[in-house]
Each structure stands twice: as C-alpha cells, then as structure tokens.
Amino acid sequence: MRKNPNDMQRERHILCKKRYKGLRRVVCAILCILLPVFCAGCGSPSENPMAGIYYDDEKLASNYSSYSMEDAEQVIDGRSMTGTFRGLNGMVMFWTCEPDEDTVADIRYLLRVTGGKVKLIFVDGKNRIETLAELTKHTQMEEAETVTLSVRDGYNRLKLVGTEDAVVSFEISASKSSFISVRD
C-alpha cells in the first residue's frame, strides 16, 4: 500500500521536529554549562584595596603605612627628603615627631604629580587630619610652600597618600625630627 504524499511529508516534518527538539536540548545544556564559566571570566577586575585608603579618614589617622607601589626612589639628608614614588596606592608615613611638650615644626614641601591623585596630610597627636596639599597631574604646585604645624603631645606624622597609581616627585624638609625611609 502506497502512502499519501501529504502523510509522507507530515512524517518527515515530525521526524525533523523531533531531531531539532533533541538538538535544541543539547545546545541548551551546553550553554547552561558554559555560560557561567564565560561570565566568571568577564567580571569587573577586583579593585586595589589600597586605592580606598585615599578617602578613609580612619585608616589615614592610623600609626602605620599601608601601600602598594611599583617603585620608590628617595634620598634622606638630615631633615630633608627628596624622591619619586611610582604607582602609589595607599598611604606612606615618612615623618614622625613625638615631642615632650607642645611645639611647632616648619614643613616645606614641593610636590609634582604626573599621574593619579596625591595628597600630603598631617596627622596630629590626637589623630586629627589636616590636608596640606591635594594634587593631580592637572593641578600642580608652582613653587614650594611652607607651613608651620602645631606639634602637640603624642604621635604626630606626615603621610603622602596616593590613588589611581599615582606618580609623584617630592622635596620635603622639616625643622624638627627626622624622616623615615620608605621601601618599594
């Protein structure tokens, strides 16, 4: 008995539909397995934990340095320090003073920023923060500035704080105490 051409076409259509349905299930299963693998690699890169320090007053007031840096060049000569920090993220404490009685210290500084953001801060013995300068590569110091700081009983310190892989050259001198060597 011969089949009707319409029935044969219907059978082929049903057979193709079953094959397509099976292929569609396989493709969906593969995508469900591979999609999470691809998406895991496409996430945003983890932020440098040191970069957030720039805006965190509690961390800035701490008694330590916390930074990542590509390179540090520095020369300490008595009560002055010159150098360049490259790729700075975080805070570098480079001057401390613990007087027996309240006094003053003259700080002279010149900063040149060619990348990122940088600020020079003074943290007094009661952990109060004073920003002496804040610069980017678009805002430069034309000449050195001098500030007289009230250095009170306690642990007083100067810190250079950077973010966005800051590149900064500096010249800093102090009338009291001495500078601390910074390691890269």
Image (tube, rainbow, N blue to C red):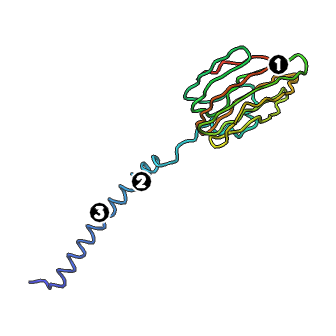
Mark 2 falls on what kind of element? helix
User: Up-down: is 107 above or below 76?
Assistant: below
Distance of label 2 from label 1 (alpha carbons): 59 Å
Looking at the image, which residue is at 59% across and 30% down? 68
Q: Position of residue 71 (x, y in %)?
A: 56, 26
In what quadrant of the picture does the N terminus appear? bottom left
Q: Residues within 10 Å of mark 1 (few under 14, many from 20)?
A: some
- The residue wearing badge 2 is 35
Q: Nearer the viewer, residue 129 or 81?
A: 81
Residue type, label 3: Leu
Question: Could you tell which of marks 2 and 3 lies nearer the N-terminus?
Answer: 3
Near-viewer residue (48 or 115): 115
Name the residue carrying label 3. Answer: 23
Front-most of residues 68 and 46: 68
Q: Are marks 1 and 3 in contact (CB under 8 Å)?
A: no
Kindly indicate the quadrant of the structure image that contains residue 168.
top right
Count of numbered circles on the image: 3
Where is mark 1, residue-wise? 98
As drawn, the residue found furthest toward the right would be 101
Secondary structure found at label 1? loop
